[in-house]
Amino acid sequence: MTRASPSTSVSGGGQRRRRWAYTAVFVTAVLLAATLTMPALAQSGNDTDAPTLSAAERGNETTIVVTITDDQDVDESSISLSDFEVSSGLLRNATVDESGSNAIVELRLVSALDTDNVTVSLAGSISDATANTVSSGSATATGMDSRQPRLLDFSVDRLNATHARIGVETTEPLSRLTLAVGGVNAGNLVLANFTETIRNSNTVEYVRVHEFDEEGESRLLLMQLADEAENTVGYNARRNYLVDRTPPTASIDGPSDVTAGDTHRFASGADDNVGVESVRWSIEPNTTRAGRSVDHTFTDPGNRTLTVTVTDGRGRAVTVRHNVTVRPGASKDGVDVTPVAASRTNATVYADRAARRVRIADERGHLVSRDGVTVEALTVTPPANESIRLSATVSGQASAFTTATGRRSVAAISVDHPSTDTAENVTVAFAVDRLRLQAAGLAPDEVSLYRHNGTWRELPTRVHWADADRIHFTADSPGLSTFAIGASNETAMRGNGTNTTRNESDDGATANGTGGANTTGSDDADTSTPTASDTDESASLVVTAAALADETVGAGEYAVVTATVTNEGGRTGSRTVALTGNGSTLANRTVTVPPGENRSLQFATRIDQRVTLAVDETTAGTVSVRNDSENASGASRTRTQSESATSSPTPVTDGSSATDEPSVTGTANETTAGGGGLPNPLALWPGGIVSTVLGGLVALVTVSYGVLKALAIYLGY
């Protein structure tokens, strides 16, 4: 029997020991792993609860923070943007973070929202670590409204003379509303003064019926709106409201006695403190017209009633009536009128006419006119069964009449006809502008028509009717001839007791028959000195107002003063008024004013120092002279003014309170002498182009010197 050597035994035993050691290590590791994982396996086997969408809250104006909770652990990889829906707005992206066993999801919106509460709902499935899933649930985030309320409408609707409906419509409910009322009915309105109505269109209307006590204009300014999230916006939306308790005025101005076939003008006298909206006329049955004045021809004799209704801008109306008696008139049958020029017209009356007495006038109701004088018609009785031909002209001068009689004249009328074409029983209807009479210094009742037949004979003349601009006359003549419109004999006798010839400054005609009357009708052109025949003891001319055009002028410039002279008496009168400066007379003007009327005068005087100007005893104001800097030669000033009132609401984007003040800006632009051309050579130094070039050269020389000096020092020179 062979015995193993010792070395062999030792080697075999070591291998066995190593195998047992490896086996022990492996068994120990398995047992340890089992010990560690057994509780988890036991626990996972018991987890059956799914995650929950437990909360949502505002992160910022475009972020909602959502919390997903789980008792073990949320599987964050199962969460995406498509898992969520929001009740308002659109989602842009989602960010997921772990927080213990929970998950925090930040949902970012595309834009800020206009609603306070936003509900976040699950639209997909979210899992936990053990594959438990949830696909439903919601949570609401509050305070998400970050957009300002938007004004849809702001209206002020009149209900009656003193009450208006104020309406404010917005996109959402408000927590604050501020509306200022200025003008005669000043005050402020707030949200508590309005009634809120939420409409089906998700808009909100605030309404108030407001009473305006004082008569006059009030200004309503919508200043500020704030929603329930206290988002605030300032507005500058304006509306006006006028309290009008004053009805319009009306008075028919026109003749009350007319002849059938004649055309007459009727004026309404319409006026109102807030403006006339409409003027409606009712003339004869089935005849209506519109306008402040109307021209009408009554065709049939009888009694007529004219009615005019004037309505103002606030719906208030007044109606007045005017009775007219229409007398039988001459016939136009067989009459042919042919205008030749503005101041000349030819006419023919044929033998086969229907009536003996005829009226010669065109369809417009006049025959011929010139310089404010119109021959409206000639009514004549021609010879039986005979034709007549005539030519009518009007001249702006009646120098022959003035030379022969020494009386003031207005115009001359000439009716030329063959000596065989005679007519009798003539009535001349003519009209003269008020300004033309004023230039001649005549009142309407001081006018007569004269006929020349070897001598000038005064004809029976009467005022037929008058309107605001013209006086209409009729005069009776035994036949046709040359006529003159002039001062009546009674007027001339009342003036100085004799028929003396007036000079050119009185009536525009010289003693030898040359010259002409002043036909402009302008007060400013009247430089004559009044005489006894121009004025009357019952005239009373006083300066009732005087005002400056500008309270500041440049040295040596003109100060302009406008004055109003009123005749408070019962007759036309003239007088001289004076412009004074610090008590010294600077200029004189003469003015003629009819009774009950007023005229305006303007004075212009150079100013080189501060002075107080007055017209007679009425102070116009004090004029100051601008200083040198304000009056610098060549400076042009531009002043612009803008007001932010708009017909539509204009938000103030920074949310500040809107103001009601206009902005005024001024600029001053310097120009070269002469307004253009070459620049002033002196402007090239010191700040011109020469200065720039010289400055550059000096700098270059200085730098070069410094460099050379440093180099010399370095080299030992």
Image (cartoon, rainbow, N blue to C red):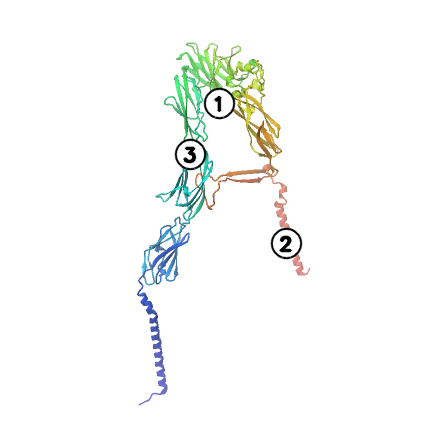
- State whether residue 604 is above or below residue 146: above
- State whether residue 168 is above or below residue 535: below
Task: Using a 10 Å C-alpha cutoff, classify the residue at mark 1 as few (fewer than 14 neighbours), some (14 to 19) or many (20 or more).
Answer: few
Quarter of the rendering containing residue 337: top left
Q: Secondary structure at mark 1?
A: loop
Which mark is in front, 1 or 2? 1
Which badge, 1 or 3, is on the more N-terminal residue?
3
Quarter of the rendering containing residue 497: top right
Tell me the residue at 65%/56% (across/down).
Answer: 708
Residue placed furthest toward the right: 717
Which mark is in front, 3 or 2? 3
Q: Secondary structure at mark 3?
A: loop
Quarter of the rendering containing residue 717: bottom right
Q: On the picture, is 288 further left or further right than 695?
A: left
676 and 548: which one is in front?
A: 548
Q: Secondary structure at mark 2?
A: helix
Residue type, label 3? Thr
Cα–Cα gap, marks 1 and 3: 38 Å
Residue at mark 2: 703
Residue at mark 1: 469
Q: Which mark is residue 162?
A: 3
* Quadrant (top left/top right/bottom left/bottom right) for the N terminus: bottom left
Task: Using a 10 Å C-alpha cutoff, classify the residue at mark 2 as few (fewer than 14 neighbours), some (14 to 19) or many (20 or more).
Answer: few
Disc 1 to disc 2: CB gap under 8 Å: no
Which badge, 1 or 2, is on the more N-terminal residue?
1
Residue type, label 2? Val
- State whether residue 1 is above or below residue 417: below
Is residue 279 at all visible to an observer of this figure? no
